Amino acid sequence: MQRYFIELLKEEMNSRFFITGDVTHHISRVMRMKPSDELICCSKDGYTAKCVIEKISSEQVECTVLEWLENSNELPVEVVVASGLPKGDKLELIIQKGTELGASAFIPFNAARSVVKLDEKKAAKKRARWEKIAKEAAEQSHRNQIPAVHSPLSFKQMIQRANSADVKIVAYEEVAKAGEMSNLQKALCATKRDQTIFVVFGPEGGLTEEEIHQLKEVGFITCGLGPRILRTETAPLYLLSAVSYQFELMR
């Protein structure tokens, strides 16, 4: 059944409600749905309902909730992925696949070795595209919520965003090269349901020693991600898969 994220809260969907904007076009023109067809609607505050279409026009789709669905496809913990700005479309891949794997938010940041530098205008355009990718990936993977996608931050701003996280991890290839293989497992085992894990990944050139020093000063744990050195776009997916295994498949 087709799934859509709509710009309404649960309380605004209790009676008949109206879907507008791009979703209307997709329902009527792309999927060619008709009155009496059923669909899944996800509210802005994370609730999911099975709905039926009452009326369709070129501007809006009128729906009624048939039942509220209790099941959640979200990870039992929140995982915030902070990525040093990589080259090309690598961040798009991280956002798309990271959304499928359950990330709750994506924070790109300007690392010392980031080659890409975005001015305010380019950053706004990029963010709009990143948000679209996250939304489409959330629909495809049957998420209950769309991950938040932030505009690029400075390294200092990124660290400040991690202040409220329960567990703070930085993937660091130098400790991986030295054979470190237990810190990630220890961190995940110590994490409880509903807590937030904030994970930092460097750009293509990795994080500098100074950046690692600053992260460790505010409580970040340096972790290796196995014996192989992963690309900047692969490492977040490895981490999210490990989180899913720990909190979904092992319990």
Image (cartoon, helix red, strand yellow):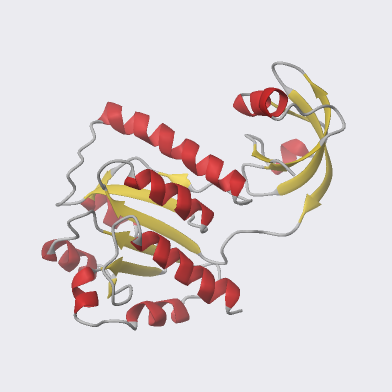
Q: Position of residue 35 (x, y in %)?
A: 85, 27
Q: Is residue 43 above or below residue 234?
A: above
Residue drawn at point x = 54 percent, y = 45 percent = 137
Is residue 163 visible in the rendered image? The answer is no
Vertical comparison of 18 with 83: above or below? above
Residue 101 visible here:
yes
Question: Considering depth in this image, is 228 or 61 the residue closer to the camera?
Answer: 228
Residue 65 point in image, percent of width and height: 82, 40
Left or right: 10 as drawn, with respect to 226? right
Residue 104: x %, y % from top left: 49, 55
Residue furthest to the front in view is: 228
Spot occupied by residue 158 in the image (x, y as percentages of width and height): 29, 52
The structure residue drawn at horizontal position 55% and vertical position 40%, both measured from the top left corner, is 136
**Number of residue marks:** 0
Residue located farthest toward the top when viewing the structure as drawn: 58
Q: Is residue 241 left or right of residue 177?
A: right
In the image, 79 versus 163, the foreground residue is 79
Determine whether 122 is above or below 162 in the image.
above
Q: Quadrant of residue 200?
A: bottom left
Q: Residue at x 72, y 24 (%)?
A: 28
The quadrant of the image that shows the N terminus is top right
Q: Which residue lies at the image location 39% right of the left edge and 44% below the top edge?
A: 92
**Which quadrant would the C terminus be assigned to in this image?**
bottom right
